[in-house]
Amino acid sequence: MNREPPGPPGRPGVPDLPGPLAAQVASWLRGDPDPDDRAELARLVAAGDVETVAGCFAGPLAFGTAGLRGPLRPGPAGMNTAVVRRTTAGLAQWLRGRAGGADPTVVIGYDARRRSDRFALDAARVLAGAGARALLLPAPTPTPVVAFAVRHLAADAGIVITASHNPAADNGYKVYLAGFGGGTRSGESAGGGPAGRGTGAGDPGHGAQLVTPADAEIEHTIAAVGPAVDVPLADHWHRLDDSIVAAYVEGAVTAVGEVGAGPAGAAAGPADAAGAAGTARGAGAARNAGAPDVVGGPPPLCVAYTPLHGVGADVVDAVFRRAGLAAPVAVADQREPDPAFPTVPFPNPEEPGALDAVLALGERLGADLVLANDPDADRCAAAVGRRVLTGDEVGLLLAEQVLRERPGPVATTIVSSSALRELARRYGVPCVETLTGFKWIMRADPRLAFGYEEALGYAVAPDLVRDKDGITAALALAHAALRAKRAGRTLLDVLDDLCRQVGVFATGQVAARFTDLAAIDAVMGALRASPPSHLGGRAVSAVRDLLDGPIEPAGPTGPAGGSGSAGGVGAAGPDGESLPAADVLIFHLAGAARVVARPSGTEPKLKLYLQTVVGPADIAAIGLPAARRRAESELAALRDDLRALLRL
């Protein structure tokens, strides 16, 4: 193995690297096991691209909202072979420590991004070299299937190589754990299968994303790992087969059927698990032909769909067919995985223009429902006709569907709409509001029936997947649309009914993208030092700074009445626990409006989340269309003030 660094970085006409940076580069080149990454770094040095080289060494990637994410580039500030190997070595050591020296079991999955398969194989080889049992999924797989596999196989942890909806230049490393910290350990799994010890019975964090303090502990362990070139590797890892996908398909259909449209869920034929797996892997044009789900009759529901060049299409098709529905009709040039994302520069369903192709397809088909997954299929966007539903609107629709059939605790985040709290009050169930991210939502209550966040993440089957799942969300929406269609209605009519009950909660975002992360800290600091007294023509009645420390739970909120009362922002966790400290500012405004400011945990963005409310009493007085116009007008005024404040 070539471990020699290139010659001295400086040469006539090319700027020398600053001394400390030159030393970092030389050290990294000696320890980088990947010849392509070494060559790329040497090329940047030889070209005198000091700025780019400095960016590669701007600091190690840190665990954010969803693990590691960063651009594919050499150095500690990029996603590359050395970073993946050192991260996995640190994780393996941490898991072994939590297991009292026993060999942990880890499931590894990956998406179809550039180098994802190589990084997944690297992770498997490092785990095997550390004595762990590494279970590698057989092909690019949706993230929810990997999260499912952690629980299904009673593994100690799961790794997913994915950057979800980030741009094509990025990749990432997501970690699931068998419970908080190392998880509940209760012996080997029954049946002698390839399982770990973390069954996690009664533990809401079993199979969820890692949280504090595990993230900091793992980062500390990673920092102590030596050069990546010295990390031991082995090839006695185990490749899983398609039965994991088949088990997920069966579990998804069963779980969603419990809150679905009854007859539609029962219309499935006697396809067995092997048949479901074959459907999931056997992509073909016939799948998009709108085949009837009842022999001799037309399909009762027409769904237009896009996976945005990601890995969701095959499993979505399998789940729909197993549930007795026609497979969605997919956008042809977005159906197959493509790491370049050629038709969408930002493959995020929330980004302007990302849904243009599937909306046009839905219009041509006269589709009852339009659906989109992000590239790793853990998020789901929805539209009816050309009307794109917000994440909060989809969350309200799904919550009502779940609570109608399976009432229980629900959870959302402090940046999502307060409408869920009001709906929960009407159903007489607890509603917990958490910090942003499904790692917190899933830990809200061990009996959790439903959870969502406004960024298109939904858990309609939290006992199946302890994370957001865009596939089960898509199926649940299809069931709801079918039920509405049979009644001569659409999901928009259902949403109108809900708004009349709980109020109109208009929500939106202002997002500022930065190239320098320090600029985000500076803006948050300025907002803390000199908060605005008015926003959108409303007085700022209170400012809550979660960075100051734990915030005590807010009291129960009443129903949304007139414009002056609505479900407020509660910081309560399960059993009244307080929220941990976080870099979040909450501005409460007159009339139950609200602005929440926070840095993104996955992208170099500052995000501000806006809400205005018109309650049921005012809706009854002025009508739903006028109430919506008023809420949107007030939201626009808020947005304008915030853009001016941030000089956007």
Image (cartoon, rainbow, N blue to C red):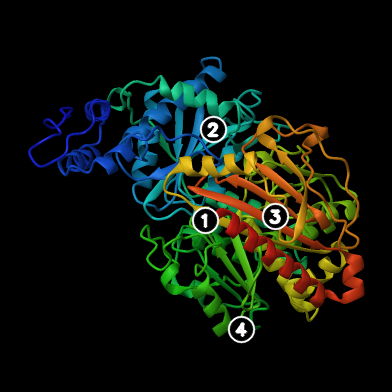
On the rendered image, what quadrant is the N terminus found in? Answer: top left
Q: Which residue is mark 4?
A: 366
Q: Which residue is mark 3?
A: 254
x%, y% of residue 290?
56, 78
Pointer 1 with pointer 3, Cβ within 8 A: no
Question: Of the residues shown, which amino acid type is indicated by label 1?
Answer: Ala
Q: Quadrant of residue 296?
A: bottom right
Query: Which class describes the residues within 10 Å of circle 3: few (<14), some (14-19), or many (20+)?
Result: some
Which of 63/509 is in front? 509
Q: Which residue is mark 2?
A: 157
Mark 1–mark 4 distance (CA, rounded to whole Å): 30 Å
**Judging from the image, what secondary structure is the residue with disc 2 in?**
strand
**Judging from the image, what secondary structure is the residue with disc 1 in?**
helix
Numbered label attached to residue 277 = 1
**N-terminal of the two: label 1 or label 3?**
3
Mark 1–mark 3 distance (CA, rounded to whole Å): 16 Å
Q: Is residue 466 visible?
A: no
x%, y% of residue 243?
52, 48
**N-terminal of the two: label 2 or label 1?**
2
Mark 2–mark 3 distance (CA, rounded to whole Å): 25 Å
Query: Which class describes the residues within 10 Å of circle 4: few (<14), some (14-19), or many (20+)?
Result: some
Q: Residue at x 56, y 19 (%)?
A: 99
Q: Which residue lies most toward the top here?
A: 100
Mark 2–mark 1 distance (CA, rounded to whole Å): 24 Å
**N-terminal of the two: label 1 or label 4?**
1
